[in-house]
Amino acid sequence: MPVPAWLQQRLEAAGGSVPFARYMDWALHDPDHGAYGAGRLRIGRHGDFATAPSLGGDFAGLLAAQVAQWLDALALAQEIGASRLSLIETGPGEGDLAGQLAAALVAGWPLLAACTELVLVEPNAGMAARQRQRLENCPLPVRWCSFEELAAHPLRGVVLAHEVLDALAVERIVIGDAGWRQQLVTLHRGTLRLEPGGPLEPVAAARLQPLGLQPPGEQRPPGWCTELHPGLEPWLAACGAALRCGRLLVVDYALEAWRYYAPQRSNGTLMAYRGQQASSDPLADPGHWDLTAHLCIDSLVAAASASGWQLLGQCRQGEALLALGLAERLHGLQHQGTAGLGDLLARREALLRLVDPAALGDFRWLAFARGVSAADQAQPRPGETPLFLAEPAQPTEPGPGLASAATETTQSTPAP
Ligand SMILES: C[S@@+](CC[C@H](N)C(=O)[O-])C[C@H]1O[C@@H](n2cnc3c(N)ncnc32)[C@H](O)[C@@H]1O
């Protein structure tokens, strides 16, 4: 496929090649040509890929109880006269989750909703334009801001990052004859190629040891390739500077380092999505496909800790949603008569997909806090929804074989 003129010019200006992360950032976030930057990607059953909120309102309906509990704990700890609480959604996509959560809070927790604003952090103008349309009649006050703008007057509240961090550009590294190399995207006779570049910068090389990648080891032959996540720490630091006090919930497809970097996973987790199709070719039609990589849980937790976040806990989405009442919701559908049977069946299917361990149920929920004293940690009061979080499970044996690697690369977003 010919290289688009805009990309050809950029690559020529850069000397013919750029690190993979720079290419991925352009392909996703360039304001004129990027898949998100230009607002080209559509999220939903009839779009390029589906996410949990795009399957209907039940995901937000369940998550609302957790968000309300955290906001409530902040409200109780709030000094008299303190400013309002904020529900901050980063990377809101079509605006579905924000709209659904606002409606659920107003319906279920009206007093809390009365002192809560919705703040959306969306760097891509093309996506923000659609969010404005979707949230035209939002029942909460709503504004769009960057983390940098918020840092001038940091907020008290809850930050949600649902399928956002997987859209941050990843660095790809590949084993060459003499050790690790940075992977480059190069122009070659009018086409794009992935090629090994020079040795890793010291900052990138220092990241390998804790991930079990240094030395590469005999089980990883030349050509073995994976991803690093250099964008996490700056993102978490910027997010932290925007929040004086509160919690961050990251929901995404993620793997522990021992699984992410298992020798069998010889080409990382990077995938491209468009029109409900998945592809492993990140160079096809740049700016028209979503490019996404799993998160590495260890890298995320380390970056969060370095940015002043305290890990509260983590679990799989299936466990979280069951703790928040998914089974009861599913059961309740049976008592709603047969009017609107099509809608009921669609909701049933969506609820089952949310907990399917081979799909959305395997997503990870990781919760972090900052500026919250131990006494203010949200504990459920008698009769309240329990917190979903459990202590992170430690692996007791080496990583899985190829069988589970294969299921995990298909666990992400496209609808079947
Ligand atoms: C996969 S979509 C997820 C949308 C939505 N959260 C959902 O689950 O349906 C990724 C979203 O993150 C936005 N995004 C990309 N980079 C971002 C960043 N650095 N900070 C905040 N949002 C970002 C994209 O423009 C897009 O809206």
Image: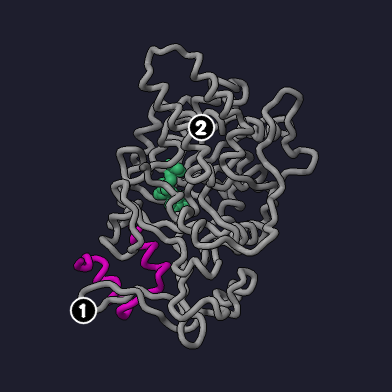
Foreground pick, 149 / 293: 293
- Image-based side of 257 in relation to 410, left or right: right
Q: Position of residue 248 (x, y in %)?
A: 61, 45
Horizontal and vertical percent position of residue 256: 60, 58
Q: Is residue 281 above or below residue 201?
A: above
Do we see residue 154 in this rendering? Answer: no
In the image, 192 versus 329, the foreground residue is 329
Tell me how far mark 2 sits from mark 1, CA to CA: 49 Å
Q: Mark 2 highlights which residue?
A: 60
Q: Does label 1 point to a residue whose CB lies under 8 Å from ligand 1?
A: no
Q: Which mark is residue 189?
A: 1
Q: Which SS class for mark 2?
A: helix
Q: Main secondary structure of the magenta part?
A: helix
Q: Position of residue 152 (x, y in %)?
A: 57, 49
Residue placed at 20% from the left, 75% from the top? 190
Q: Looking at the image, which residue is at 46% across and 74% down? A: 224
Q: Mark on residue 143?
A: none
Q: Nearer the viewer, residue 57 or 85?
A: 57
**Point 42% across, 56% down: residue:** 292
Quadrant location of the N terminus in the rendered image: bottom left
- Give the total number of marks visible in the rendering: 2
- Residue located farthest toward the right when viewing the structure as drawn: 375
The quarter of the displayed image where residue 232 is located? bottom right
Q: Which span of residues is magenta-colored?
A: 1-30
Q: Position of residue 247 (x, y in %)?
A: 64, 43
Q: Amino acid at mark 2?
A: Ala
Visible residue check, residue 195: yes
Q: Amino acid at mark 1?
A: Arg
Question: Is residue 7 in the magenta section?
Answer: yes
Q: Residue at x 57, y 47 (%)?
A: 364
The reply, left or right, for residue 382 in relation to residue 269 is right
